[in-house]
Image: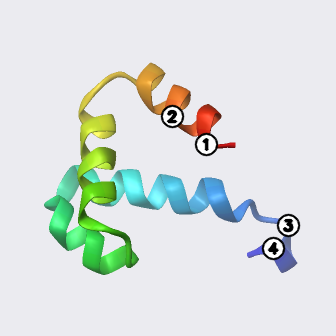
């Protein structure tokens, strides 16, 4: 993706948010290779306002 000028992190995050809306967190955990607690946290962000998600992303940078 980087070779073609596409932003990898934002694409990954978007894909994860789309998946977490439709799938249980444990499935997303296996699918993306992340810890189940991380998948659960993403599920919480997906159900809450975007403000909490953006705050978490900003604090991790």
**Along the polypeptide, which appears first: circle 2 or circle 4?**
4
The answer to which image quadrant residue 6 occupies is bottom right
The tally of labels here is 4
**Along the polypeptide, which appears first: circle 3 or circle 1?**
3
Q: To which residue does mark 2 refer? A: 56
Rendered location of residue 42, percent (x, y): 33, 47
Rendered location of residue 7, percent (x, y): 74, 60
User: Element under label 4?
Assistant: helix
Q: To which residue does mark 4 refer? A: 2
* Labels 1 & 2 near each other (Cβ < 8 A): yes
Q: Which mark is residue 11?
A: none
Q: Is residue 22 left or right of residue 59?
A: left
* Labels 4 & 3 near each other (Cβ < 8 A): yes
Of tags 3 and 1, which is closer to the observer? 1
* Labels 2 & 3 near each other (Cβ < 8 A): no
- Taking 20 as reference, is 32 above or below it? below
Of tags 2 and 4, which is closer to the observer? 2
Q: CA distance from mark 1 to mark 2?
A: 6 Å
- Identify which residue is drawn at 64% across, 59% down: 9
Q: To which residue does mark 3 refer? A: 5
- Identify which residue is drawn at 19% across, 60% down: 25
Of tags 1 and 4, which is closer to the observer? 1
Q: Is residue 5 left or right of residue 57?
A: right
**Along the polypeptide, which appears first: circle 2 or circle 3?**
3
User: Element under label 3?
Assistant: loop
Q: CA distance from mark 2 to mark 3?
A: 25 Å
Q: To which residue does mark 1 refer? A: 60
Quarter of the image with the N terminus in it: bottom right
């Amino acid at each position: 993706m980087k070779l073609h000028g596409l932003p990898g992190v934002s694409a990954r995050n978007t894909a994860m948010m789309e998946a977490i809306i439709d799938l249980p967190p444990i499935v997303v955990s296996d699918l993306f290779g992340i810890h189940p607690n991380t998948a659960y946290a993403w599920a919480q962000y997906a159900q809450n306002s975007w403000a909490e998600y953006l705050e978490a992303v900003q604090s991790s940078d």
